[in-house]
Amino acid sequence: MVKDGVFTIGLDIDNVLNACAEWFVEYAAEHFDIDVELGTRTAYNWSDYITAEQEAEILNQSHLHFGHFRPRQIAVEFLRRVHVIANRNNIKVRFIYVTDRRFLGFPYKELLKLPPREETYQRTLDWLLYNGFPVHELYLEGDMGGKTKGEIAVAENVDIFIEDAVHKAMDISQHLRRIFDSVEPVWLMLMPWNRTSFLDALQQDVMPPGIRYVKDWSEIMLLLLHQWQEFGVLEKNELDALEAYRQHIF
Ligand SMILES: [Mg+2]
């Protein structure tokens, strides 16, 4: 919306669009004889529960399995509805996916045995397309000559970015905030493993501005339509209809 009348939505993939954490927990329970309850898991990193070797094994194995990760149907439905609403209001919307499936931040790189970058890219793209996600661009973090998610988001003129990892949200926010100084461009989805780190960062005053905590896709839809209405590109009855519908069902 900021540039060329196009609104660009940036999306993380793992845990935002699929049930990746559920797969990790199942794998850990089956192979390492530990039982991590998803609902009570408060750390984003696995180092509290397993060794670096075990974590590397999970990351390596995930590359063999992520084609089978279950998509979150509510995310598929959300993106399709956004597409429909954008179309009938003549809004050009782009969906940009950026994933860290090369695990750039993993400290024990020598333990990783990943396939070539092209294979990761193609299998990720196949998964998105097969499951019905609208795709305009897909990037692996580190693409564009080593750019981070935040740098890719800037290069792609992302208006909002939906993410579940606090440290990624901070990177994206720090970059996007240089462009948009009056809005919150990063929408961090509430998950058991980010609640504590989000609150810690707030308490230690290291949480950068520009990150909004959102509880679910329904809230994201409401925020998105409000933003479009403020930009003056949305018919008023769209938001009225959504709010009436929410009152009816909740
Ligand atoms: Mg994620």
Image: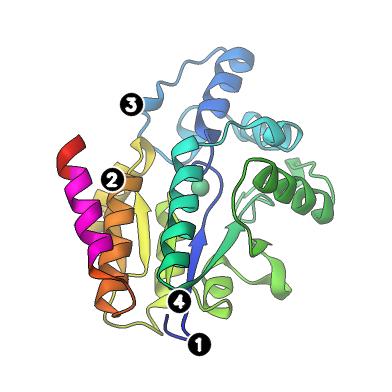
Q: Horizontally, is 2 left or right of 218 in the view?
A: right
Three-letter code, disc 3: Thr
Q: Horizontally, is 19 left or right of 180 in the view?
A: right
Q: Horizontally, is 185 left or right of 219 in the view?
A: right
- For disc 1, the marked residue is 4
Q: Is ligand 1 closer than 8 angstroms to the Cβ of mark 3? A: no
Q: Is ligand 1 closer than 8 angstroms to the Cβ of mark 1? A: no
Three-letter code, disc 2: Lys
Q: CA distance from mark 2 to mark 3?
A: 17 Å
Q: Which residues are magenta?
A: 237-246
Q: CA distance from mark 4 to mark 1?
A: 20 Å
Residue 40's label in the rendered image is: 3
- Near mark 2 (Cα within 10 A), the count class, few <14, some 14-19 or many ≥20, is few
**Mark whose residue sits in front, 2 or 4:** 2
The residue most toward the left is 247
Camera-side residue of 144 and 76:
76
- Near mark 1 (Cα within 10 A), the count class, few <14, some 14-19 or many ≥20, is few
Three-letter code, disc 4: His
Who comes first in sequence, dot 4 or dot 1? 1
Residue 215's label in the rendered image is: 2
